[in-house]
Structure formats: structure tokens, C-alpha cells
């Protein structure tokens, strides 16, 4: 099944997520958005603020909103980029 093939990509953090992660971006290998988020959680298990923020963030995959889709159903292609967008004041 193509959804199980791990693909290389980048997770980019913005605003409070960037501060909580201690970096602007990092490489990750995953097959789905859920897999990418699991990899981030595992890599940052010692950063509780980032783990908390991931629960309320919005995500863009290659510039497109993932919306209400189940992260396990969002397949990643080679070279993907996921933008982690925490809630912003006023919106």
C-alpha cells in the first residue's frame, strides 16, 4: 500500500511552535501527516509546551490547509513540507 511508504520531508514551525520546538524546521520521514506528527512528538518528548501546542495547531501540507481531515488519511509525497501553525491572537 502506497500510504505505508515513508517519504522524506520537512516540518516547519511558526510563532509559538517555533519557540517551543527550539528550531524553525527539521527533517522527518513519514507516510502520513499522523506519522509526521508522531515523529515530532517522539523527537520532542522533552518539550511539553510543543506537545501541548500540537494539539491545537493547524497544518498546511505543501501550502494547502489539511482542514478537518483525519491526519492518518493525509498522505505525504516525497519532498513534502508541513507547516505547523499555532493559534494566533485575534484569529
Image: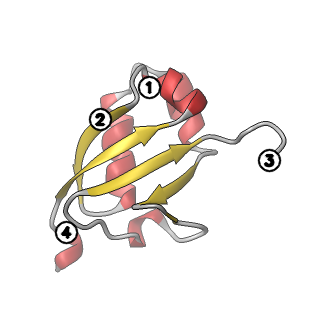
Q: CA distance from mark 1 to mark 4?
A: 26 Å
Dot 1 falls on a residue whose secondary structure is helix
**Which residue is at 18% across, 59% downward?**
7
Q: Earlier in the sequence, mark 3 or mark 1?
A: 1
The residue that mark 2 highlights is: 26
Q: CA distance from mark 2 to mark 3?
A: 26 Å
Q: CA distance from mark 4 to mark 3?
A: 35 Å
Q: Residue 56 in the image: x percent, y percent?
A: 64, 45
Q: Residue 23 in the image: x percent, y percent?
A: 39, 24
Q: Earlier in the sequence, mark 4 or mark 3?
A: 4
The residue lying toward the viewer, choosing from 6 and 81, is 81
Residue 91 shows which numbered tag? 3
The residue that mark 4 highlights is: 4
Dot 2 falls on a residue whose secondary structure is strand
Dot 4 falls on a residue whose secondary structure is helix
Residue 66 shows which numbered tag? none
Name the outermost residue toward the front: 63
Colour scheme shown: secondary structure
Query: Looking at the image, is 3 positioned above or below residue 45?
Result: below
Q: Is residue 4 left or right of residue 53?
A: left
Given contact means CB atoms under 8 Å apart, are the residues at marks 4 and 2 in contact? Answer: no
Q: Residues within 10 Å of mark 4 (few under 14, many from 20)?
A: few
Residue 21 shows which numbered tag? 1
Q: Earlier in the sequence, mark 1 or mark 4?
A: 4
Q: Earlier in the sequence, mark 2 or mark 3?
A: 2
- Of badges 1 and 4, the one in the foreground is 1
**Which residue is at 44% across, 25% downward?**
21
Q: CA distance from mark 4 to mark 2?
A: 21 Å
Q: Residues within 10 Å of mark 2 (few under 14, many from 20)?
A: few
Query: Looking at the image, is 61 positioned above or below residue 85?
Result: below
Amino acid at each position: 500500500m502506497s500510504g505505508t511508504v515513508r517519504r522524506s520531508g520537512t516540518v516547519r514551525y511558526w510563532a509559538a511552535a517555533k519557540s517551543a520546538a527550539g528550531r524553525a524546521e527539521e527533517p522527518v520521514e513519514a507516510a502520513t501527516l499522523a506519522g509526521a506528527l508522531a515523529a515530532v512528538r517522539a523527537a520532542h518528548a522533552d518539550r511539553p509546551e510543543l506537545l501541548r501546542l500540537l494539539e491545537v495547531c493547524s497544518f498546511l501540507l505543501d501550502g494547502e490547509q489539511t482542514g478537518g481531515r483525519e491526519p492518518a488519511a493525509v498522505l505525504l509525497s516525497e519532498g513534502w513540507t508541513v507547516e505547523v501553525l499555532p493559534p494566533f491572537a485575534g484569529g
